[in-house]
Image (spheres, helix red, strand yellow):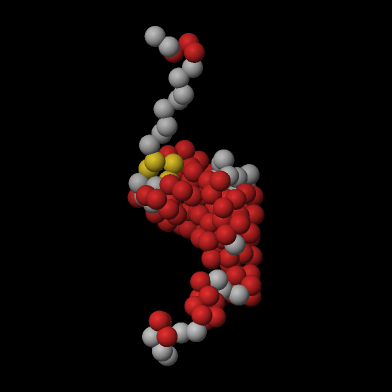
């Protein structure tokens, strides 16, 4: 293969902007991850934070418009930006994920006849990974008019 400076312009453009067919699987995977992550807000055992981060990674390869939407989203945007900048997860997200995974694991333990420990093991591994990550400091509450000195 010739050196990069000798490649035709069309090849260089193709490398920067992959074809629609190369972007489509990333877009579909991002939409699927985001959808399951949103469902995970309401259903224990589905970790929202990792799925939103996965969606952001997929969107970065599949759709700059979806990536921009996710980064500017008031709920998910700060989480993704913190992750990309510092590999940090908000304390509240860690706490909520741990509680919902514990509740989901307890429910699975009572409902699964075979391998009832498997969901608990998976959740414990995710929780260990999650808690070893740096925690984003809690933002101080905004000062209200009653706080003025």
How many numbered discs?
Answer: 0
Do we see residue 2 in this rendering? Answer: yes
Q: Is residue 46 visible?
A: no
Q: Front-most of 48 and 108?
A: 48
Residue drawn at 49 percent across, 17 percent down? 144
- Decide which of 46, 17 is in the foreground and name it: 17
Seen from this angle, which residue lies furthest top?
A: 149
Q: Position of residue 50 (x, y in %)?
A: 50, 54
Which residue is drawn at the image coordinates 55% and 71% (left, top)? 17
Residue depicted at x 45% and y 25%: 141
**Residue 43, percent from left and from top:** 62, 47
Looking at the rendering, in which quadrant would you find the N terminus?
bottom left
Q: Position of residue 147 (x, y in %)?
A: 44, 13
Out of 61 and 32, give the one closest to the viewer: 61
Residue 74 is situated, as x and y percent measured from the top left of the image, at 57, 40
Q: Is residue 117 above or below residue 138?
A: below
Specify the quadrant that holds the C terminus: top left
Snapshot quadrant of residue 94:
top left
């Amino acid at each position: 293969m010739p050196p990069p400076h000798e490649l035709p312009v069309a090849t260089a453009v193709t490398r920067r902007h992959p074809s629609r067919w190369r972007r489509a699987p990333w877009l579909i995977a991002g939409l699927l991850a985001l959808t399951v992550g949103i469902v995970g807000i309401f259903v224990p055992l589905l970790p929202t934070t990792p799925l939103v981060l996965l969606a952001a990674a997929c969107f970065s390869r599949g759709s700059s418009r979806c990536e921009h939407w996710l980064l500017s989203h008031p709920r998910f945007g700060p989480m993704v930006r913190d992750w990309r900048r510092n590999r940090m997860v908000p304390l509240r997200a860690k706490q909520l994920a741990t509680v919902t995974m514990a509740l989901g694991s307890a429910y699975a333990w009572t409902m699964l006849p075979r391998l009832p420990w498997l969901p608990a093991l998976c959740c414990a591994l995710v929780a260990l990974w999650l808690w070893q990550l740096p925690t984003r400091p809690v933002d101080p509450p905004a000062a209200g008019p009653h706080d003025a000195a």
